[in-house]
Image (cartoon, helix red, strand yellow):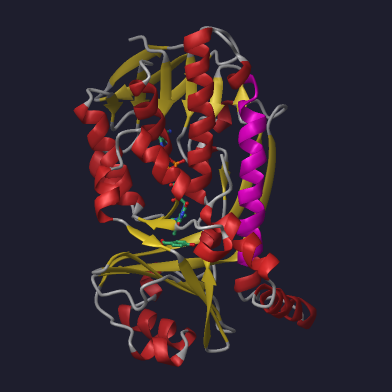
Amino acid sequence: MRTQVCIIGGGPSGLLLSQLLHLNGIETVVLEKHTREYVLQRIRAGVLEHGFAQLMREAQCGERMDRECEIHHGFFIAREGILNRVDLHKYSGGNSVVVYGQTELTRDLCDARARMGGIVVHDAQDVALHDIASDKPFVTYTRDNATYRIDCDYVVGADGFHGISRKSIPASVLQEHEKIYPFGWLGVLSRTKPVSPELIYVKHQRGFALCSMRSQVLSRYYVQVPLTDKEEDWSDDAFWTELKNRLPGEVAARLQTGPAIEKSIAPLRSYVCEPMRYGRLFLAGDAAHIVPPTGARGLNSAASDVYYLFQGLVEHYRTGSERGLETYSQRALARVWKGQRFSWWMTMMLHTFPDAISYDRKLQDTDLDYLFSSDAAMASLAENYVGLPF
Ligand code: RFL
Ligand code: PHB
């Protein structure tokens, strides 16, 4: 088989790029390792920048999102039992964020690809990239014991942090920057009414917590846990008790609890690889960079990669110019690093670090004192949280 752009990974990055390219007359094939059902049951992001929402509309996938999402103009940071509101709308010049689950967004993208006859191969095993440094790259994979070959102009690695694409870049070229945090987030999804109409990020000496949501009947909560903890260690009761311990009293008192319909632990890590292009291979999204979820940047950073790459590919196929493709890595990384900085800052300010000294704790407190006493600090937080321009 031959196509113009072969995309590895059928997560949000790969599907969104495929959809945008299709609408501009560029052929793609998406190779996804897992089944459609598996991809659609993963619970991940919940907060989208308005720029991401705009890109979904441009991809003709925004209809259900616009109908079912919630627009949030602010969120809370709780400390010492008190809720402090961050007014995103006021401090970002009238912007807001969109609360819509990654699961739903991925479903909308999958449905759109199917509706428009896009080729998305699920259950594609042993995907391997070949000759990416030449002008005739190709990709092979197996499915049902048969091996297939796809010849293409370009390969896009949108196969997440554990994917194979990044590993195809020679070690002599690839630079990796990584920071691992000494804890994870235990997340619970429950069919209960969210405890607050806006998200609450909680700084507490027992550890960070977050109250989020997917809809008015579906809540998403997280608590910071040691890396040694396993999901099985946490009964539903133990989770709710720990969450209540960390919430301000008035919030804990109105928390509705119920059976966990999903429970998982995600370790926290910051990672960037450079460059994001090697020969005919372009990396996008988690394949090239990940952030701790504290700043809600991961999927949003993926969206800006997709935007720059989409622009570069359309320019190339329309005019023959290589400019957009040649500057892709540089443009994408400039924004990626700003998302890294913001996620690192939110993580450092709000979590309990097992090896913190009193000096570190004083700085965390001072960071929050400064934030809630300075319009400039608030504006900086708000500008980053609603999303820097693409
Ligand atoms: P994905 O979603 O990991 O998709 C990659 C796809 O590639 C497939 N794949 C392969 N396919 C073929 N061959 C191979 N060898 C392959 N290896 C892997 C995988 O099966 C998968 O389908 O990456 P993508 O598309 O770049 O999307 C990135 C986002 O998923 C991620 O950044 C966000 O979920 C991060 N994130 C958040 N981001 C936000 O912007 N806002 C949030 O509120 C937010 N909350 C979160 C988050 C991530 C979390 N976890 C679980 C780490 C909350 C959590 C708890
Ligand atoms: C979520 O709803 O899963 C979520 C929201 C905000 C974050 C991280 C995760 O910062």
Judged by its main secondary structure, the magenta piece is helix
Query: Which residue occupies the extreme right position in the image?
Result: 359
Q: Going by the image, does 99 lie left or right of 245?
A: left
Q: Residue at coordinates 28% horizontally, 81% vertically from top-left?
A: 257
Q: Does the magenta stretch include residue 344?
A: yes
Q: Residue at coordinates 71% horizontally, 27% vertically from top-left?
A: 173
Magenta residues span 326-347
Residue 292 can be seen, yes or no: no
- Occupied quadrant, residue 362: bottom right
Residue 327 can be seen, yes or no: yes
Q: Is residue 318 above or below residue 118?
A: above
Which residue is at the front of the view, 141 or 351?
351
Q: Is residue 384 above or below residue 138?
A: below
Q: In this view, does 249 lie above or below 223?
A: below
Q: Give the percent coordinates (x, y) of residue 108.
A: 27, 41
Which residue is at the front of the view, 58 or 262?
58
Q: Going by the image, does 327 lie left or right of 228?
A: right
Q: Going by the image, does 10 lie left or right of 290?
A: left
Task: Please give the count of numbered marks on the rendered protein.
Answer: 0
Q: Going by the image, does 243 lie left or right of 284?
A: left
Query: Which residue occupies the extreme left position in the image?
Result: 115
Quadrant location of the N terminus in the rendered image: top left
